[in-house]
Structure formats: structure tokens, C-alpha cells
Image: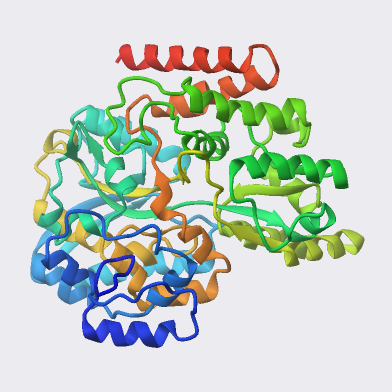
Amino acid sequence: MTSSPFGRMDSLSRRRFLAAAAGLSAMAALPRHTLARLIQEGAAKTGVDPNKWNPETIQALAGTITVDTAAELHALVPQDTAGEVAYWSVGPTEASPQITKDLYDQFLADFATFYPNIELENQNVGYNDMLDKIRTAAAGKSAPDVAKMPILWGVEFAARGHLREIVLEDYGLSRELFWDGALKSVTWQDKMYGIPTNNETMGFIYNKKIFADAGLDPETPPATWADVVAYSKQIKDETGKNGYGMVAKVNAGNTPFRFMPLLWAHGSGALDEAEPNPTYEASMINNEGGVAALQAMYDMYVTDRSVPTSALTNTQVENQDLYIAGEIAMMISHPSEYVAMQGRAAEATGSDKERADEIVANMAYGLIPEGPVRRAVVFGGSNAHIFTDEAHGRPVDMNAAKALMATLTSPEWSLKNNWTDSNPANLRGFETQFMRQRLDEIKFLEVTTAMLPFGIPFPVVPESPEIMNIIVPDMLQNALTQSMTVKEAADDAAQKINALIAAR
């Protein structure tokens, strides 16, 4: 019997899968049982084999099951359940795509249909305001019943005792339905304090024409980080353009999202977050792999000068400008970057438009390169949490909260609520007809989605924002400006991280 990325499939899903897989010669194995059967059989681990989770299998699995969300929810929480629940999340803004706004409204309408006797008090809170708002509310005993928060925010509230412990099985879920990185992100001191709702990873973007002009194969992205360094130099030497879009700005979230994959790939980490069972007690950033990763950045910036000199102050916004101008050949970003480049090309005029259209036409995506130890990418997304009675200021209506949590994490709504910019955390979402539609609509989605098994969350500790946004970028600045040697910069970062953890 052969296996799929999700384990085995039943005969009906297998027939659907075979129909969907017609013509996909790269398929290595065919699934035979649905994820529901996998749950019933009590699999011990996430049911995904990274070696078989690739763009071809992602395309083939999409649309192989039909979910009855109402029936699944009502098996957990009866339809006639009455109650009330306050819910906060970062919802769409005026700038959001129309489909995001439409699906946000549809979620609220569907929940009212699923549970007509539960009053949902919904608040769409701006991203820049939500963290401080929840901090203030929890401290003042007025937190919502349920909040959907970006992947690393929850640990702060768990550490303060503001979140209720979660047992997945109470929600009709189990560990094998989620990526390992997702489960790490909701775990604090060996207990779970949330349920993943959505997860995303980035991909490696490159300009095929610049590759060809530099004598590189335009159909083959760099396989390793050593290739990135070598290709960046070759592009600079042969074309005069910058090879890699380095980002090293301090206190900018773009920086760790682009450096940490390199660090983890070399067997290092800010702490031990890339290890199977992290303890988050001591920094690994100055080990042999950490120094090698930082040396690669130094080689591109100082020795080869193959990246923009403005990398010390660049964010991804500046990289977008450089990419659409044809001044850099490689960068890390989301699948939405393609749409962003199309938009920039549409706004261009004259010769700028001709050049921009050519760049969009030659835009390609590949997997984040491997390092000597592993392939890795930052694991992003959001989690749903239930606050404690104390943080809420009164008893949480657990029946209503459970109904909302189950809806948010269902295969349908863990996907629909994150249509354009993420993926369902519930792995069954990848098999739905909704995933089929997304793949048809969003170019390169299957490539960035293929990185999910290699996702690693930032350290799940309250100190993570300072480590990621300040200490790690400071290390880069110290090395790239040559105010410290590479080893000194790594040692300095390790000392600061360890001191921060010890001061907790």
C-alpha cells in the first residue's frame, strides 16, 4: 500500500484523487484514506510526509472531499445552543481585496445560521492596535471571550495566565491535523493555549531573464544557500545588477522573516526553536552554524558587494521597488508578491511599463533553498484563543466559545477566512473544493504552500519580539558594518538573548 502526504484515503476519496491527479506524472504515491479515517485510527504524528508534499500533490489533493460544515459543527455543539460570545480579530481594511471583505461578512452570516441562538459580538480591530488593546483589556478584566491573534502574540497572554488551556479533542480535532510548527506556536510550558486557524510560509522569487543574462539556468532556482551566495555574485559580476534582495533593517519584521530561514538551515537558531523539542533556555545563535549563516550575509554584503548597499535600511517595500525596476534578481516573499508586481506594472507608463511587464512575465517562484542541516522557512499565521474568566471579568460562556472556536478551525472557514494571504491550519482544508478554487485563482500558491512542512515558528517565548526585531537585526548590522567581526557579532547576540531570558 502506498501513502500520501496525509496518510491513507478511503476508496471514494481515492477515486476523486485519481481523477484530479490525471496528467500529474510527478505524483510519487496515491492517497487511499481521508484525514477523517486517519483521525479514527489514532495516528501519533502530523499526517504529512514532507517528501511527498509538493506542488503536484497539493494540486491533486485539492477538491477531493466535500465538507458539511454545519453537520460537523452540530455534532460538537448542538444547533439550538443559546448564549453569547465576544470575538476580536484583525479583519479586512479598506485596502483589502474585495473577496476578503466578502468572505469576512459571509463568515458572520454563516455563524448566525449555524447557531441562531448565539449572539456574536464581533470586533474588527486594526493590526497596529489589537495587541495593545488586548493587553489593556486583559489587565482590566475585560478581554473578549475569544480572540484570533497573530501566531506569536498568544504566548505573552499564556505566560500571564490569561488564556484557557485547550484540549484539541474537545473540538473534534487532533494533533495529526496540524503542522508541527503550528502546534509549537500554541504551546507554553507543555500545555496548549489555543488552536491554529491558518498558517503560511514564503517562497523564493527570482527573475528568469536576469538569470539567463548572467549565464544561469532560468528554469532552476538556487537549491542551496551556498548557491544563493554564488548566484548573487555571478549576477553582479555578469550583469551589474544586484543578485539577492537582502533585508537587514532594525525593528522591522521583514528582517527576521528573511534571515531566520538561513540561520535555521545552518543548524542554528535564536534559541533552540528549530529543534524537535525546544526548551527555549539558551541561545544557539553563535554556534558553528549560526556563525556560518552570518558569514554568508557578510560575504554577499561586504566581500562580493552583490546585494544593495541600502540593505541596512531596506524593508520588503524597498525590495519591491528594486525588483520591479529590474535591479535585483532574487528575494523571499509571499505568493501575493506576484499580484503586487502586477499592480505596480499596471501603474507604470511608457518605457517603465514595458520593462515592468517584462519583469512580471519573467517572475518565477521556487522553494526556499536548503542549508547544510535542513530546509527552513518562517512559519506564520494566526491562532484562536479563549480567555480565562479572570481576564474576561466574568465567566466565559464556554458553549458559545466552543461553537465559535470550532467554526474558526473548521476545514471550510480556516481556509475561507484566509483566502488571499494564508492557508488553512486544519489540514483537511487542503482537500476541499475551496482549495481547488484558490489554486486556480492565485498564481504560485502551490509553490509557497509546498514550504509548509519546513515551517519553523519564531521562539514561543514572551521575549520573542525583542529577540527577532532588535537583537537579531542588531547582530546583522554589527557584522555588515564591520563594527564587530562575524564571530563577535554572533557572540554579542547570544549574550543579549541569554540575558533577556534569564531576566524573565
Q: Position of residue 153 (x, y in %)?
A: 35, 37
Residue 418 visible (yes or no): yes
Query: How many labels, in total?
Result: 0
Identify the residue shown where x is 20% and y is 41%: 193
**349 relative to 250 in the view: left or right:** right
Report the front residue among 456 and 410. 456
Q: Position of residue 2 (x, y in %)?
A: 29, 73
Identify the residue shown where x is 64% and y is 38%: 315
**401 relative to 316 in the view: left or right:** left
**422 relative to 46 in the view: left or right:** right
Note whether 35 is above or below 391 in the view shown: below
Report the front residue among 454 and 178. 454
Report the front residue among 108 and 357. 357
> In which quadrant will I find the C terminus?
top left
Identify the residue shown where x is 43% and y is 27%: 270
Residue 400 visible (yes or no): no
Query: Looking at the rendering, which quadrant does residue 463 occupy?
Result: top left
Looking at the image, which residue sits at the far right?
A: 351
Q: Position of residue 134 (x, y in %)?
A: 32, 36
Identify the residue shown where x is 24% and y is 39%: 187
> In which quadrant will I find the N terminus?
bottom left
Q: Position of residue 298 (x, y in %)?
A: 67, 26
**209 relative to 70 in the view: left or right:** right
Please say which color scheme the image uses.
Answer: rainbow
Report the front residue among 120 and 171. 171
